[in-house]
Image: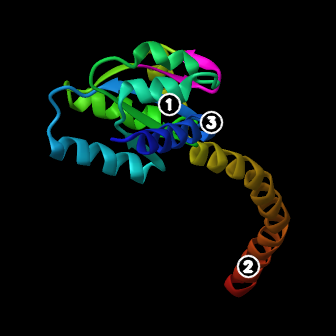
């Protein structure tokens, strides 16, 4: 890799570190190509990405960024998982690490907050952005459906009373 290519990689990694809601660093030693492709596929479905880069270039790219705390994890065979959603990448990596013992979570960063292994697992337990949006929409929609039910109830009650009176009239 020549100098221009290295500079391009450092620039791309710098963009990733600036725009990602969460970055998780894991060791992937011993994983097969098929396992790595499976991880990439799961991450893509969740709206995140996986990137393998030379640790030296990643350390240069992370220098001076909010996620600079991850530089201590950049040793050995590391993979970077990241997403704009502050929870998505952590969820996928945590779930995959439970299924595959070859993937070991080292730590990560959420903005300028450093995350150790337990921090990444805690973030993975949080609801995703989509889940939060769904719960907010449900909370907003619930009062409206209650109002509609309350407004419709008197008409329903009147109809059942009239039906009962009509049945009594026919029986007499």
Q: Is residue 157 above or below residue 75?
A: below
Q: Nearer the viewer, residue 148 or 36?
A: 36
Q: Residue at x 17, y 33 (%)?
A: 31
Q: Residue furthest bottom?
A: 170
Q: Secondary structure at mark 1?
A: strand
- Near mark 2 (Cα within 10 A), the count class, few <14, some 14-19 or many ≥20, is few
Q: Secondary structure at mark 2?
A: helix
C-alpha gap between disc 3 and disc 1: 10 Å
Which one is in front in this view, the residue at disc 2 or the one at disc 1?
Answer: 1
Q: Is residue 155 above or below residue 55?
A: below
Report the quarter where the N terminus lies: top left
| Between discs 3 and 1, the one toward the N terminus | 3
Q: Secondary structure at mark 3?
A: helix
Q: Residue furthest front?
A: 3
Instruction: State the image coordinates of residue 30 (x, y, percent, origin top left).
Output: 14, 28
Give the total number of marks visible in the rendering: 3
Q: Which residue is mark 3?
A: 18
| Between discs 2 and 1, the one toward the N terminus | 1
User: Is the magenta region chiefly helix, strand or loop?
Assistant: strand
Stretch in magenta: 107-114
Q: Nearer the viewer, residue 142 or 171?
A: 142
Which one is in front in this view, the residue at disc 3 or the one at disc 1?
Answer: 3
Instruction: State the image coordinates of residue 79 (x, y, percent, origin top left).
Output: 34, 31
Q: Which residue is mark 2?
A: 163
Q: Which residue is mark 1?
A: 23
- Near mark 1 (Cα within 10 A), the count class, few <14, some 14-19 or many ≥20, is many
Report the quarter where the C terminus lies: bottom right
Q: Is residue 36 above or below residue 45?
A: above
Q: Which mark is residue 123?
A: none
C-alpha gap between disc 2 and disc 1: 65 Å
Q: Residue at x 47, y 22 (%)?
A: 120
């Amino acid at each position: 890799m020549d100098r221009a290519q290295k500079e391009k990689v450092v620039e791309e990694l710098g963009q990733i570190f600036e725009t990602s809601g969460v970055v998780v660093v894991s060791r992937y030693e011993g994983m097969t190509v098929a396992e790595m492709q499976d991880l990439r596929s799961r991450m893509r479905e969740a709206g995140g990405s996986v990137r393998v880069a030379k640790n030296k270039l990643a350390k240069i790219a992370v220098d001076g960024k909010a996620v600079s705390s991850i530089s201590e994890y950049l040793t050995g065979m590391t993979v970077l998982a990241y997403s704009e959603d502050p929870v998505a990448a952590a969820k996928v990596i945590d779930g995959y690490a439970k299924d595959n013992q070859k993937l070991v979570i080292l730590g990560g960063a959420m903005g300028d907050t450093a995350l150790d292994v337990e921090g990444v697992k805690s973030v993975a337990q949080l609801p995703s952005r989509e889940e939060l949006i769904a719960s907010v929409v449900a909370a907003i929609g619930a009062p409206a459906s209650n109002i509609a039910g309350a407004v419709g109830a008197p008409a329903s009650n009147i109809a059942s009373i009239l039906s009962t009176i009509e049945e009594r009239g026919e029986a007499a």
